[in-house]
Amino acid sequence: MNTPSLLLLCVLAARCVAAPLPVIFDTDMDSDVDDVAALAQLHVMADRGEVELLAVMVSGHNEWSALCIDALNTFHGRPDLPIGLVSGKRGIRQHSHYAREVAKAFPQDFREKHEQIEAAALYRRLLAPRTDRDVVIVSVGDLTNLAALLVTKPDAHSPLDGRALVAAKVAHYVCMGSRYPAEVDPGTGKWGNFRTDPDSTREVIERWPTMLTFTGGGDFADAMAIGRQIVKLDPKVWPVSLAYRSYFEKTKTGPVRHTADSIAVLVAVRGFAPWFKVVERGSNHIDEIGRNAWREEPDASNQRYTSELIEPSDAPKIAALLEELAMTPPKTGLPAGR
Ligand SMILES: [Ca+2]
Ligand SMILES: [Ca+2]
């Protein structure tokens, strides 16, 4: 082979290796524990070159959530990863059975070393300099931060308002929330990510300008529950193990927990194939208390959901994959001397 064709081959080969997917993770990191496994999975995918983790946003007012996130980020070798905080009166405070425990047991310096920045401002700062419409947002908590982002005004980072900035820079938003095709619980419980802040939920879903994929919870995520292997890890070494142990102990549940947030991460990074059935036609409607119903009409071409497996018998296989990802040691190695 002559030199020019060898060069061409090299260029083509380089192009075939996909660039890491730039991801912003927006989490409540409070009431439920599946956020911990989901964040661990994103870090492992970043270690493997699948993902470039740009930041983590906290969607609720629990004072331990950001510290817990920083402890997880530090464990995975990303101690300085930016963390954005919820702002305004819409964000709610939910109790956590693990965030304080993880924040106190593992190294983190969120209060001492990190910029205390509102999530909407951090979104703007991260999105503005992107050169392609390539960022993927995964929300596995309340939609409070994203509603705040959409109504931001032009600033020093960008002449675009929030919605235009999202339209220009965000390729895809994957939203873990509620159940499909509809959630019908008449109670007033604030659960499932949509009912916690219904106004923000409605605004985001009605106004989101790019592709929006919903992933469901309930039986769908229960079928892929994990935790049996995670809790076998040493909780003095592994924050994910401490989080799941603490959650199971305090809620008197276990030995497994659903993977709603992990499924959202998997879909965002690796897509639907070969497991997840997709419903393209229709759009998601949110009532006054935050219950959703998927309606075939009107069709929103940018909205779709998955809440069912193509082959239900694949559930254990997917659960095993999710648990293995959450238990993969950081590329930087396990912390020494603990
Ligand atoms: Ca830190
Ligand atoms: Ca969550």
Image: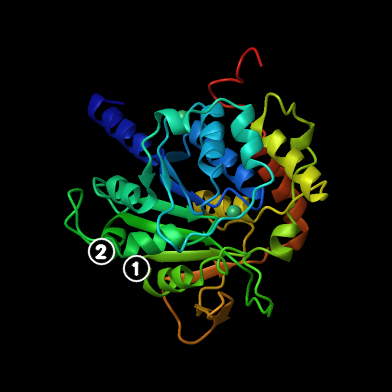
Residue 100 percent coordinates (x, y):
62, 38
Q: Amino acid under label 1? A: Pro
Residue at 58%, 56% in the rendered image:
273
* Callout 1: CB less than 8 Å from ligand 2: no
Residue 37 percent coordinates (x, y):
63, 43
Name the residue that disc number 2 marks: 164
Residue at 66%, 69% in the rendered image:
189
Colour scheme used in the picture?
rainbow
Of all residues, the one furthest to the top in this rendering is: 337
Inspect this view and state whether residue 48 appears: no
Residue 103 percent coordinates (x, y):
59, 34
Residue at 44%, 62% in the rendered image:
89
Above or below 133: residue 231: above
Inspect this view and state whether residue 47 appears: yes
Q: Amino acid under label 2? A: Ala
Name the residue that disc number 1 marks: 209
Taking the image as shown, residue 63 lies to the left or right of residue 8, namely right
Q: Residues within 10 Å of mark 2 (few under 14, many from 20)?
A: some
N-terminal-most mark, 2 or 1: 2
Q: Quarter for ligand 2?
A: bottom right
Above or below 140: residue 216: below
Of all residues, the one furthest to the bottom in this rendering is: 297
Taking the image as shown, residue 337 lies to the left or right of residue 150, namely right
Q: Nearer the viewer, residue 255 or 64?
A: 64
| Picture quadrant where residue 244 is located | top right
Q: Nearer the viewer, residue 271 or 189?
A: 189
Taking the image as shown, residue 90 lies to the left or right of residue 124, namely right
| Picture quadrant where residue 178 is located | bottom right
Q: Nearer the viewer, residue 174 or 31?
A: 31
